[in-house]
Structures are given as C-alpha cells and as structure tokens.
Amino acid sequence: MSTPEKTQPTAAPAPPPTSRWRPLILRLHFYAGIFIAPFILVAAVTGGLYAIAPTLESVVYRDLLHTDSAGPARPVSDQILSAQQERPDLTVTAVRPATEPGDTTRVLFTDPSLGESKRTAVFIDPATAAPVGHSTVYGSSGSLPLRTWISELHRSLHLGDTGRLYSELAASWLGVVALGGAFLWAERYRRQHSRNSDNARLFTVDRTARGRRRTLGLHGASGAWIVVGLVFLSATGLTWSNHAGANITDLRSALSWTTPAVDTDLTGPAGHSDDQHAGHAGHGTSDTAATTEAVDVRQIDGVLAVARANDITGAVEASIPTSSDTAFTVAQLRDPWVFSTDSIAVDGASERIVDVQRFADWPVAAKLSTWGVSLHMGVLFGLVSQLALLALAAVLVTMIIAGYRMWFQRRPVRSGASPVGRPPQRGAIRRIPPLAAVGLVVVTVAVGYFMPLLGLSLLAFLAVDLVVGVRSRAVSGATPPRSG
C-alpha cells in the first residue's frame, strides 16, 4: 500500500513591480495637493454656484424675463421703437426677440457708463410693446447682474486681472492633479488585484477599512468617477484665462481653428448665399452703393423674415448696424439643447443675403470649442448639465477635504514631531530611465511655456523641495540626497 505524496503549499504570486514613474508622480501630486488645492477648492465652490446660476437667474428675474400678457406679438420693430423711447440717450445695437408666449423681448443698447462687454437691456412685452423693465447684461450669454456677479466671483474673485491669476492657476493644475491621481489610484488597484486582495477596489470604497485607508479609498474612488470631468473643466477653463488663454487663441488662429464670422461689409461686391432657401431673400434687390446714412430699425422685420426663411430660427440675436454700409446679422444663440449656431448677414435696405455661416461648415475644433464652452457654463443640456456640474463640484470638494485629512492622518502620532505627514521620499527623478527623464524635462519646459502659471508654480515646488532637502540635511547631518 503506497502512501500519498505530500503536496507542497502553493506560494503566493509575487506582486507586480511598482512603476518607475510612481514615486515622481506621487511627489508631484503631493505638492500640488498641498499648495494648489486651496485654489482648486475655491474654484470648485464658486464653479458649483456658477453652474446653477442660469436657473437662479430665471427665478430671481422672472418679472423681467416673463410676462402674463396674452395675444399676438407686435412687430419687433415696434418693440425696438418702444425701447428707444425708454432709453433715448443710448444707441440700440441688437435685439433678442421673444421665442415663446410669455417671454419678453430683449432690446440691447451700448452704454458708455458700463464696463467691457456690458450692455443695457430694455425688456419689452411682445403683446403690448410696452417696457417691463431694464437691466445690465453681460457677454454673449446676456447674463443678468446676479449671474454676472457669480461669474466674476468664479473668474477673478472680483479682484480684476490680478484675481484671474487664481482661476488660471487652478485650471492649469486641475487636469495635472486629476490625471496624476488617476495613475496612482490605478497603480494601487493593479497591485492589490494581482494579489487577489479583497481590498482591490477602483470605483467603490472598502467599508471595512478604517483610518487613513478609509479616507484614501474615498479620495481615490471619488476621483476615478470624475477624472474625465475634471480634465474637461481644466481644458475649457484655460480658454478664459489671461496667459494660457492667449496662447490657446494664437494656436487656434495658426491652425485655422477659429470660429468663423459672417461678412457684413456692404461696400464690396454683392454677397451671395449657397443656401437652397436663398430665393426667399426679400421683396427686391438693390445694386446701388451702400452709404453711411443712419439705419432705419424698422428694417429689422424684413431681416428677421429672411433669417427665418433660411432656417435661422429659435432664439436669435439680431445685431443692428450703426450705418447703412454694414449688414444686419442674425445669429442663433447658445441655448439649452441647441447644438448648432448658424448665422446670416442681410442688407436691411434690399433684404439681400450678404453672407451665411452654417455651423456644419465650421472647423471641428471650433465646433468642439463651442460645445465645450456651453457645457462648462451649464448651458448645453440645460438643467441636466447644471446639476451634473454641481455634483462634480461637490465631489471635488469632498476629494480635497479627504486629501488634507490623509495628510493629517499620516502625521507621526508617537513622536509628535510634526502635526502633519511627511512628504513622499525624495530622489524620484533618479528612478526613471535617463532618456525618459530628458524627454520629461523637454515636455515640462514646453508645457510650462504654453501654460506660464503652471511652469512658474512648478519651479516654486522645486525650490520648496530643495529647501526641504537642505533642512533635512541640517537636522540629520546626513549627506543630502538628490532632488526629485
């Protein structure tokens, strides 16, 4: 009778090696979290408020935006003339006709007493052509004072160009911090999953964990859910910034990615349209040279009819020229669930189409930019996008608080030498291949040049790192390690 062979216990699989990039990314993520997170926190709080500003605006200014009058709308020209009687001291420049029963028409005036990109709006009841009030509006979105105040808070903390440095710094680092954190979290999951650990979680929190592990789980899982949204907010937010935004504008111009504009010049050759509805242009044509006489605002009714015949419908803004050598323009507004914004230029005297710009013909980059800006502003999908952005801001705030809590939880409890945790180990740059390190330096310099605040703050991090190294040397008397 043979005895069974003894089975040897199976050795646990060795964990996969840690990525050489992890120490460097961890150290960068740590410093950015300590020094830049306060700016991102402020941007998240103000951005969440800005996201729901359109809804707040519709409630606060209901008396200006809506009317209870019933009946057919008066001609838009009559509504403009009524607004001009209300503000005869100003020059009318545009009108946004009411689109739905119960909405008011918005007649816009230039006002030298206001700041840049601000206009005075007189709100008209379309059924009676009577003014219902007036207010200051800002930008192409036509935001009213409450939304404008929130916008400027988010953009500059009401500190002018100096305050805009805060939002640019936050936008510059947000994408870097998000992608770095996603890499670290995925690397941790990979190692845990390879060991068949029950704690391997990517999108959920281990509820059995305690202390710092529980906080880390909340921080990492939250980031895994919103990393794409954070990168999107970073990229679109930079387009509004002073320094990086200017570089983005120059790059788009160099690549012919700018947003096309209709030609409004009436002094050159007669314009034309390739639109199939161009035959509905108007009642007659005019071959006479345009003059610089004042424009009759009563031409607006015919201009709007031409625009409607050429499928420029829905919510639009019709720009009124200051002289007759310039065409009227009618452009669709970036309203909720509107994914294309066509525009048309029309000679008001002859109702001849001068130029048409179709959104379908825009460069892809210009389309993406328009959609991105609308989504960032909480406009593209209306209330849905506003609530999504508000939730994104709330999760981001939670992540930042959890990050600082982890820093506190890493403090040396027994010795009490520090009230917070120590930075990750230095010398991380030495762990990556030399060729990769050279490439990293080149890319960092290029990105720092394109995004100056990112580059300058990164230099500040390196300076802090050197100071920490020198201080550690002075305390321990050890040979100073290399900076990483």
Image: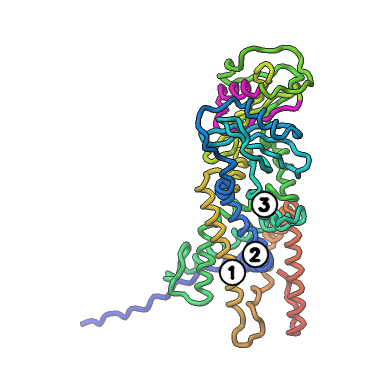
Judge whether residue 65 can be spotted in this image: yes
Q: Are marks 3 and 2 in contact (CB under 8 Å)?
A: no
Q: Which mark is residue 37?
A: 2
Please identify the quadrant where the C terminus is shown.
Answer: bottom right
Q: Give the range drawn in magenta.
A: 299-322
Q: Mark 1 points at which residue?
A: 403
Kind of residue sitting beneath label 3:
Trp
Q: Give the secondary structure at mark 3.
A: helix
Q: Label 2: how many residues lie within 10 Å, few (<14), some (14-19) or many (20+)?
A: many
Q: Name the residue under label 3.
A: 149
Residue located 66% across and 51% down the image = 151
Image height check: is 453 above or below 120?
Answer: below
Image height check: is 4 above or below 394?
Answer: below
Q: Give the secondary structure at mark 1.
A: helix
- In the displayed structure image, the side of residue 224 where residue 4 appears, left or right: left
Q: Label 3: how many residues lie within 10 Å, few (<14), some (14-19) or many (20+)?
A: some
Image height check: is 27 above or below 259?
Answer: below
Residue 341: percent from left, percent from top: 59, 34
Residue located 64% across and 40% down the image = 133
Residue located 32% across and 81% down the image = 6
Q: Between residues 347 and 125, which one lies in front from this camera angle?
A: 125
Q: Does the magenta stretch include residue 92?
A: no
- In the displayed structure image, the side of residue 226 where residue 108 appears, left or right: right
Q: Residue 379 carries which label?
A: none
Marks 1 and 2 sit apart, C-alpha to C-alpha, by: 9 Å
Q: Give the secondary structure at mark 2.
A: helix
